[in-house]
Image (tube, rainbow, N blue to C red):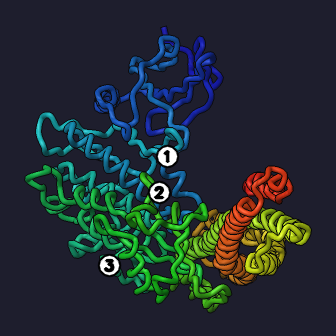
Amino acid sequence: MEKPPFRQNQNCGDWELKERLGMGGFAHVYLYQHRETNEKLAVKMCRLELTPRNKDRWSREIQIMKKLNHINVVTARDVPEEVTHISLNDLPLLAMEYCSRGDLRKMLSKPENCCGLKESEVLSLINDVGSGIQYLHKNKIIHRDLKPENIVLQDISGKLVHKIIDLGYAKDLDQGSLCTSFVGTLQYLAPELFENKPYTVTVDYWSFGTMLFECSCGFRPFLHNLQPVQWASKVRNKGPKDIMAVEELNGEVKFSTQLPYPNNLSRTLLKPMEALLQLMLNWDPVQRGGRVSPESKKPLCFEVLEQILSMKVVHILNMTTAQVHSFQLTADENLHSLQKRIEAETKIDVANQELLQETGVSLDPRKPAAQCVLDGVRGWDSYIVYLFDKSITTYSGPFSARQLSDKVHTIVQDAKKQLPLVVLKKIWGEAVSYICGLKEDYSRLFQGQRAAMLSLLRYNTNLTRCKNNMFGFSQQLKAKLDFFKSSIQYDLEKYSDQMHYGISSEKMLKAWQENEERAAAFAQVAEVNHLDDEILALHSEIVELQRSPYARRQGDKMEQLEEKAIELYKQLKMKSPETDMSTDSTEMVKAIIQTVQNQDKVLKDLYTHLSKILISKQKIIDLFPRIEKTLENIKDADTTVMQMQIKRQREFWHLLKIACAQNSSRSSMAASPESSTMLQVSQWSQSAQPVRSHD
């Protein structure tokens, strides 16, 4: 009995059909979700009656998938019993983990990625796909059909992970290391495969290298507008280190050993990436990948790959010039060593360098330079350190503008120039990349301004703490002085009253009078209102800086222009070379010019606001030594007043001793000022407790 045709709305028990994920040569992939557990499965189903050869391919994929277990290879799952009946023929279904973030082709197709992915994304791809390929080869499996469509992305604990899928063309090497059976997608295929020659694992190196090049630059390395059967004869005799071939308008083919500009890779990564691609894109399959290390048993290409991933690189954004500097750290390099290298490139003296993290925290000079290299975070687009010059507070440029590519410069010079559609698509893609880059440059500088603001707020917190400390000691000194002055005035009055007893000391009287004058002078030391007023005014300045509209991102206009450029690019891509032979670039050039003009405006506002932040911060820095000096004077005065009081107490006891010698009767003792003195000493002890500020 024939099975009924598969329906799009078909559910299987608790498993609900959500959508069709993809369609291949003879198979569809559907997404099923369990109603209760919400578990998701990608179910691959053969939709055609297959030839014996393709049946073998189908069965081989299922067998291979079930025996593999690696984070960078999609995992096979058991097919739920309820789902098995959807099969349209006698071929088994293949159930796999569902990867919700789509495939690599989807990422590459985004207009903002038309000149390559961000550096962090390229490094993540190198790590994941490189690891997956090595795992397959270790298990004696050649994939043979590596391409962006066969790399899917999954979000695992907030991290994007690449996984290799579609092992339908994979070849198990258990029966020998040379294969002569076919083939995957021609555009990413190693030359020996589409020439139907014997091949080994190095075919996957070529496909991986082609993908890496495209992810770095936005297009395939060799005459990307042509099919391999068309470009093979032109590229066959390329040099062993050539990684790119482009055809000029005059038909001449030019080769290069370097990655083209524009791309999103930092200076430190360019050379190692080129070395890796030179190994993987060698035309000779025997030489491809490089020699195999006798120690690690790995080809040189994977050793270079691991070296790239193990590089510790610090990316520094010089806020005085808007230029990014990248430094590969040596083992255990200290911060001073890094700062000397920064000084050599930026001409900012080590003593004047302030290196801030995004949180506004300065790098710790006691820790190694690697303190600003976060574990698992790679790429200058994902983490950067901001460099400020402490010797200046007003930043006015000149700022390093993003470089226009030669092709984009051509249309800016002559927007009316008619160019073939295929050429224009590449140029407009670079124009979109340039406009997106200008917006990202502004975003990074804004983050630098924000780091400066967070640093200012940290300084302001310390200033408040110092002010409260100073105010507390000031109040304590004032309390002691008030008591000391009232006490000494009382003693002077009583001294005059008891002089008829014949007990007197001109020396002591003079000392008391001098102490009274000194106490009056110390009152000036305890007075901190002038500093308090300055600090309050500074607090108000900082509040205004926080409230300023320039404390918030001002890139709305650039985002609108970016959207406009992307829409123009999409419209151009939809045009057919047959019906639209050529067009001019007036609208795209207008978008470029408007974006540059808008960036100039927002950067001027940003740097004006940044300068105000830095001026306020310098005011705080200048206040610290003044507060410290005032606090030191207050503490010295406090100590002196205590010593003066102790001296007075000794003088009282000395006076009492004289009185006792002259008057032996208890009545004369009762008339003495001792009781007054003892009471005052007790009161002094109580008043000497620290006074806490409630400010």
Circle nearer the N terminus (1, 3): 1
Residue assigned mark 3: 255
Q: CA distance from mark 3 to mark 2?
A: 26 Å
x and y percent of residue 485 in the render? 84, 69
- Please tell me whether mark 3 sits on a helix, a strand or a loop: strand
For the point 58% across and 18% down, the residue is: 37
For the point 78% across and 64% down, the residue is: 480
User: Residue 30: which quarter of the image?
Assistant: top right
Amino acid type shown at disc 1: Leu
- Please tell me whether mark 2 sits on a helix, a strand or a loop: helix
Residue assigned mark 1: 160
Q: Are marks 3 and 2 in contact (CB under 8 Å)?
A: no
x and y percent of residue 50 in the render? 37, 28
For the point 55% across and 38% down, the residue is: 100
Circle nearer the N terminus (3, 2): 2
Q: Which of 20/613 is in front?
A: 613
Q: CA distance from mark 1 to mark 3?
A: 34 Å
Amino acid type shown at disc 3: Phe
For the point 55% across and 57% down, the residue is: 109
Q: Are marks 2 and 1 in contact (CB under 8 Å)?
A: yes
Q: Which label sits in the foreground, 3 or 2?
A: 2
Would you say 393 lies left or right of 421 here? Answer: right
Residue assigned mark 2: 121
